[in-house]
Image: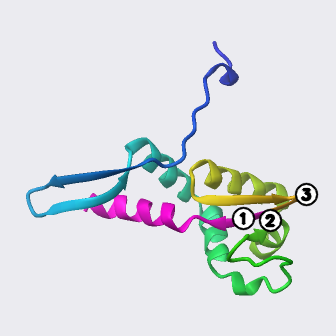
Amino acid sequence: MPALSDYPLRDARPAARNIAWYNKKHWYTGWTMHDDSLVQALRALGHPDRLRLLRLLDDVGQFPDNLVDPRAVGVCVNDLAAAAGLPQSTTSYHLGLLDRAGLLDITEHGQWRYVRPRGEALKRTAASVKALA
């Protein structure tokens, strides 16, 4: 049986494409995600801890001790872990999954990592889900 490392890795960042289609009720025109990217984004969002981390990142006012501008650079992973009440290793794991799904920007400054949500990617994910209705 092949090991997991035998399978090639691929970049799973969301790829947007412009679509126009008609379903029996209305036209939909706009940017949406490829199915693979949408599935990966929804899987990443499908855990309560990851949703909580994204909600915390959306409310950067609760990180006043952050040394950098949380809107421009992001929130320190250690501060985010403390605010979420999760161990730092668990927080890093969840943030890694969100990053691989293309939903986060991660900036490294020396040994510190700062994260912030990718607003456009989250909007595309929401639009893609809404287009299914």
* 75 horizontally vs 39: left or right: right
Mark 2 lies on residue:
77
The numbered mark, 1 or 2, whose residue comes first in the sequence reads 2
Residue shown at the point (78%, 82%) measured from the top left:
63
Q: Secondary structure at mark 2?
A: helix
Q: Amino acid at mark 2?
A: Val
Per the rendering, the mark at residue 115 is 1
3D distance between C-alphas at marks 1 and 3: 14 Å
* Magenta region, residue range: 114-133
Q: Amino acid at mark 1?
A: Val
Q: Secondary structure at mark 3?
A: loop
Residue 21 in the image: above or below residue 11? below
Q: Residues within 10 Å of mark 3 (few under 14, many from 20)?
A: few
For mark 1, give the secondary structure. strand
Task: Say which label, 3 or 2, has the lower sequence index.
Answer: 2
User: In the image, residue 19 lies at what x, y percent?
Assistant: 26, 52
Which residue extends farthest right?
A: 111
